[in-house]
């Protein structure tokens, strides 16, 4: 039998032998990711203020109408297998101090890489501290020599998710655009610059304080819970089951797009639902 006729022979054997299995779907796995870095952009025309190693970050506006913006970075690619399908993602933050009522806090994908240095603000952290090497500041992505294009950070104008934050406690952000951010970061980690968090900057006294990864209480640290469907070898059309459709895809492109390794993926998993469906 020539290699060219072997795939057709395999197909005929499967037609005779396989009767459409429908195995139970496996439970979807989840990954809980803590920020790798986080911080505050303190409005400062000199770009000298940061709090890279502090236990809190801020969003909103102070009583003196100085803006505060949060930064969060989650290493999605280090926590979720490459090629997985993101089913859902939820960001949870602990808000630990406020002087205002409910305020909208929105997530915006950052457009540039930024750093977290060793600066540490005393007291409640609201005033920040002298920026140190690699801190993100109002002007800098990495203090003191790398800069944002726009003071206050470069980010997508549209919000990926918005939540109203009121009294002290835990708050979550989720939704299809947030899922899309996480999916994009998994597919292309080089585009992952995290989120810039914006509060109400239109009035004074709207600032909210959230806890960072340096907070001594582990449960208060920023976390991104990702539910995903693992990669599924043999599922060439993405319908979460390996069946005759996938086999036909491989056979139709056999010798040009696909090879015996692809055929073996289909045969090995034939009739099975993908894990985590």
Image (tube, helix red, strand yellow):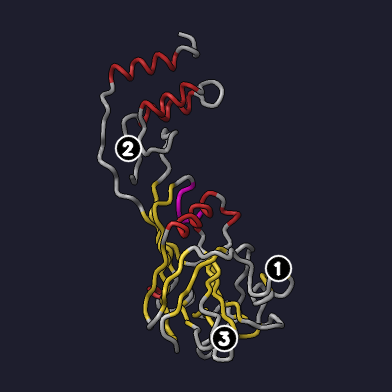
Quote the CA–CA distance across marks 3 and 2. 52 Å
Instruction: For the N terminus, give its image quadrant.
Output: top left
Q: What residue is disc 1 on?
A: 149
- Residue farthest top in this picture: 1
Q: Could you say which quadrant of the image residue 39 lies in?
A: bottom right
- Residue 169: x %, y % from top left: 37, 79
Q: What residue is disc 3 on?
A: 121
Q: Residue at x 42, y 30 (%)?
A: 265
Q: What residue is disc 2 on?
A: 273
Instruction: For the C terminus, give its image quadrant.
Output: top left
- Residue farthest right in this picture: 145
Residue bounds of the magenta highlight: 77-82
Earlier residue among tags 3 and 1? 3
Earlier residue among tags 1 and 2? 1
Q: What secondary structure do most residues of the magenta stretch adopt?
A: loop
- Residue 250: x %, y % from top left: 46, 25
Quote the CA–CA distance across marks 3 and 1. 26 Å
Could you say which is closer to the camera, residue 183 or residue 62? Answer: 62
- Residue 206: x %, y % from top left: 49, 84
């Amino acid at each position: 039998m020539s290699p060219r006729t072997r795939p057709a022979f395999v197909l005929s054997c499967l037609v005779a032998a396989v009767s459409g299995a429908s195995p139970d779907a496996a439970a979807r796995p989840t990954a809980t990711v803590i920020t790798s870095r986080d911080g505050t952009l303190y409005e400062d025309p000199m770009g000298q203020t940061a709090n890279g190693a502090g236990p809190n970050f801020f969003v909103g506006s102070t009583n003196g109408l100085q803006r505060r913006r949060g930064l969060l970075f989650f290493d999605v690619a280090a926590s979720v297998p490459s090629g997985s399908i993101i089913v859902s993602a939820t960001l949870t933050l602990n808000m630990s101090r406020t002087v205002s009522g409910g305020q909208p806090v929105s997530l915006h994908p950052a457009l540039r890489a930024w750093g977290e240095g060793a600066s540490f603000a005393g007291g409640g952290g609201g005033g920040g501290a002298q920026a140190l090497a690699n801190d993100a500041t109002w002007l800098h992505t990495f203090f003191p020599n790398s800069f944002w294009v726009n003071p206050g950070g470069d980010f997508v104008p549209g919000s990926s998710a918005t939540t109203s934050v009121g009294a002290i406690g835990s708050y979550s952000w989720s939704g299809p655009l947030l899922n899309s951010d996480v999916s994009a970061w998994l597919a292309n980690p080089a585009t992952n610059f995290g989120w810039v968090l914006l509060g109400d900057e239109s009035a004074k006294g709207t600032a909210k304080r959230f806890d960072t990864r340096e907070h001594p209480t582990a449960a208060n640290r920023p976390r991104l819970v990702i539910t995903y469907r693992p990669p599924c070898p043999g599922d060439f059309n993405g319908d979460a089951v390996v069946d005759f459709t996938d086999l036909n895809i491989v056979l139709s492109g056999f010798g040009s797009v696909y090879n015996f390794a692809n055929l073996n993926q289909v045969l090995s998993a034939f009739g099975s639902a993908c894990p985590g469906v």
